[in-house]
Amino acid sequence: MLVRFLVAVAMLVISAGTLDAADAKRGAAAVNDDGLHVQPWFLVSLLDLRDDLREAQESGKRFAVMWEQRGCIYCRDMHEINFAVAAVSDYVRENFTIVQLNLFGSREVTDFDGQVLPEKELARKWGVVFTPTTFYFPETVAESNKRSGKDLAVAQMPGYLRPLAFLAMFRYVRENRYADTHFQKYVTDHADELRRMIGASAQ
């Protein structure tokens, strides 16, 4: 099911194309010391992903890891276009705990299986080859069963999606629809509602 899901997402990424300035308002996003665009509500983490998922659970939220890198134009678009849409940023902030990792970073991260690796080695372990890539995880730590993040993830967004599909992905995970519905069908079924939420200029 996950393979079919990733193919569907890839199709959406390809069909989305590049978002012109005329398509949406571009907002300013802060940049951290590693050159990554950041949101002020991203989790300041000690980078034990098991604890981060537990913290999300205790807050009534879902947990996701966003992989980014310095100079990534699609990461910039995700922050300056997608998160500039209030309906998008509000929904993600209110429903998700987000940890941002650097594709080429050196900070040590504890994976769900207990292995401690620098970010860049964890990226290779998880098979991350481009950015942005977002992994979404199950609701409880108990479901991890000592598996790595790559195997534990219930869904993955491999690349940049325009605001409508981007918001749809977060709702798809939050509503646990990955258990019974193909993502492409979910987007189709909710397209009108999503358009109303984000406005015509940001689709």
Image: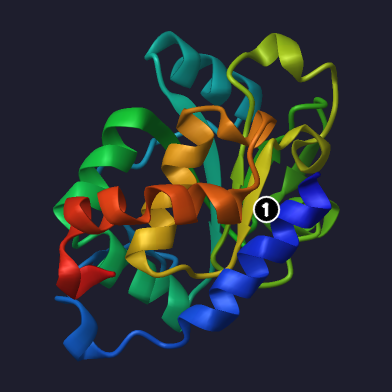
- In this rendering, the answer to whether 79 lies above or below 201 is above
Decide if residue 91 is in sight here: yes
Toward the viewer: 55 or 163? Answer: 163
Q: Position of residue 40 (x, y in %)?
A: 24, 46
Question: Mark 1 highlights which residue?
Answer: 119
In this rendering, the answer to whether 147 lies above or below 73 is above
Asked where in the image residue 171 lies, by quadrant, the reply is top left
Secondary element at tag 1: helix
In the rendered view, would you say 179 is above or below 79?
Answer: above
Residue 125: x and y in percent read 84, 52
Q: Residue at x 21, y 41 (%)?
A: 90
User: Which quadrant would the N terminus be assigned to in this image?
Assistant: top right
Query: What's under tag 1, amino acid-wise?
Result: Glu
Picture quadrant where residue 73 is located: bottom left
Q: Is residue 111 left or right of residue 174?
A: right
Report x, y in % for residue 12.
Answer: 56, 71
Q: Where does the C terminus fall, quadrant-wise?
A: bottom left
Up-down relation of residue 79 to residue 54 (above or below): below
Residue at 72 percent across and 9 percent down: it is 142
Q: Is residue 131 left or right of residue 127?
A: left
Please tell me which residue is depicted at 45% across the width and 48% down the height of the picture.
189
Q: Dot 1, crowdedness within 10 Å: few (<14), some or many (≥20)? A: many
